Image (cartoon, rainbow, N blue to C red):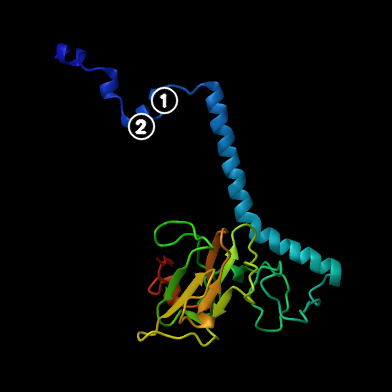
Amino acid sequence: MAATLGSTSAQDTMPPLVKQINNGNWLDQTEAESLRAQLFYQHAVYAYMTMLPALNVIGMRDGSEAEFGTGYNVLPIWKDRMDSRTWVPTPNADVIYSMSYSSAPAMVMRTTGAGSKYPYTIRDADGDFLEGGKSYKLRLPPNPPAGLFWAVTAYNVTDGTMPETDQLLPSTNGYYNIPKKADGSIEIWFGPKQPEGVANAAFIKTIPGRNFVVCLRLYGAEDAFYDQTWKPDDVVKMK
């Protein structure tokens, strides 16, 4: 028994995880500090990215209050329709637009038929980042679970603004006359050029050389969203 144990090296019996992490030894001081710096950097990037929507809204709120004053009775209303060149990160420009600010609990509650949800993707079905120079297709199954209305929008990845193309807005919604397939589903296309035979309302223009985000906005989200019996398809890159 002793002979058998003696013939087995420590390297052979070392657990795989110990092997992967510097063979069970502390890292060199310089390397450890470098890895720690990278970790802090990643935390900082994550904090920055997750806080962008809040910072954008805070900036709009502060600008509004500086221009129009403060108080619950102040409600700025846009005189003209907005388009994709505005820095206000919303595509709801099909109506006269007003804006106020709230931190009400209803903004994050799961209230069937009343709350709003914004599922999004930054990658296509192959796992690649969405890139504005390529063409993509998104299929929405029949009857999107939105009691009020639904919309699909493309956003810039950096700050939540929209691609500033010659299209009025990189967005479409359930109020438009988007052609339906025989099963009631809808296909929405993204890319730098509108494919032949695709309706205007089913096409969202993107910018080559720039990544983008696809967001599905459900206003008045219903049970089928929460229990996942309704799911949009993955965004598919077209060949």
Name the element at disc 2.
helix
What is the x, y in percent for residue 51? 64, 55
Determine whether, in the image, residue 35 is placed left or right of residue 101.
left
Which one is nearer the viewer's eye here, 55 or 102?
A: 55
Kindly identify the amino acid type of the residue bearing the numbered disc 1: Asn
Residue for point 16% across, 12% down: 2
- Quarter placement of the C terminus: bottom left
Left-right relation of 133 to 166: left
The numbered disc on residue 17 is 2
- In the rendered structure, the answer to whether residue 66 lies left or right of residue 227 reads right
Q: Is residue 82 visible?
A: yes
- Residue lying at the far left in this picture: please name it: 1
Residue position for label 1: 22
Q: Position of residue 102 (x, y in %)?
A: 69, 69
Residue 197: x percent and y percent? 45, 82
Image point (56%, 30%), residue name = 34
Earlier along the polypeptide chain: callout 2 or callout 1? 2
**As displayed, is residue 129 above or below residue 231?**
above
Depth check, mark 2 against mark 1: the one in front is 1
Choose between 61 and 152: the one closer to the eye: 152
